[in-house]
Amino acid sequence: MLSLVKNIVQYSRIYSRHFSFGLLGPRKLDELTNLPLLKVEDGKTVEKIWSEFHNEQENALGVSLSKDKCNQLLHRAGESPMFLYPVFKEEKYFMLISQFQDSYFFSTYLENYKQNPSTASPFLSCSIFQDFEEKKGISLLRVDFLPEYIPKQVWMNSQKSIG
């Protein structure tokens, strides 16, 4: 198992795209992992590999969702493609505004958006990969963010509070 995780991490470093702004654009699952190796594993193993792979990332989080949860998320996002949500940081919180497009969410600070929506740069993107939905019953979700804006631990705590 651990060697498979190492192969996936090594593969992702070789084939990852480099952006001037960061890793916030839409990406395909085969750009992040060695997809053929994951395809032969069962759903629980894919979930574990995905989680372990993202534990080593400074600028990303990865979780798996059941097929039903993913479909519910996508349905709600389609109904409300723009939404606000709080992110808690120590004793305070700040608001993010998020926009949904296809299977991707892009987020920025609400204050930046209010100042000028056309120049508010996203510093967080969330990608939903449904590649394993039919055969394994899971979807993979990846959140890429710029850690200079908010450290990974804040995102992890926020993820727990959202549930």
Image (cartoon, helix red, strand yellow):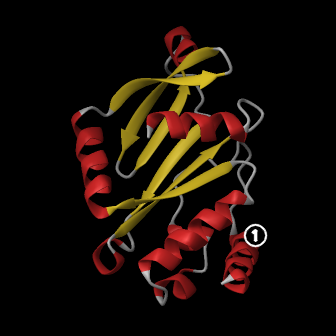
Asked whether the viewer can see residue 31, the reply is: no
Which residue is more in the foreground, 34 or 72? 72
Which residue is more in the foreground, 59 or 31? 59
In this rendering, the answer to whether 85 lies above or below 55 is: above
In this rendering, the answer to whether 61 lies above or below 31 is: above
- Residue 143 x, y percent position in the rendering: 56, 48
- Residue 20 x, y percent position in the rendering: 74, 46
- Residue 56 x, y percent position in the rendering: 75, 60
Residue name at image x 48 percent, y 90 percent: 40
Q: Find residue 92 and report its image quarter.
A: top right
The secondary structure type at the circle numbered 1 is helix
Residue name at image x 71 percent, y 81 percent: 2
Identified by mark 1, the residue type is Arg
Q: Is residue 35 left or right of residue 17?
A: left
Q: Residue furthest top?
A: 115
Quarter holding the N terminus is bottom right
Q: From the image, tell me which residue sits under label 1.
A: 13
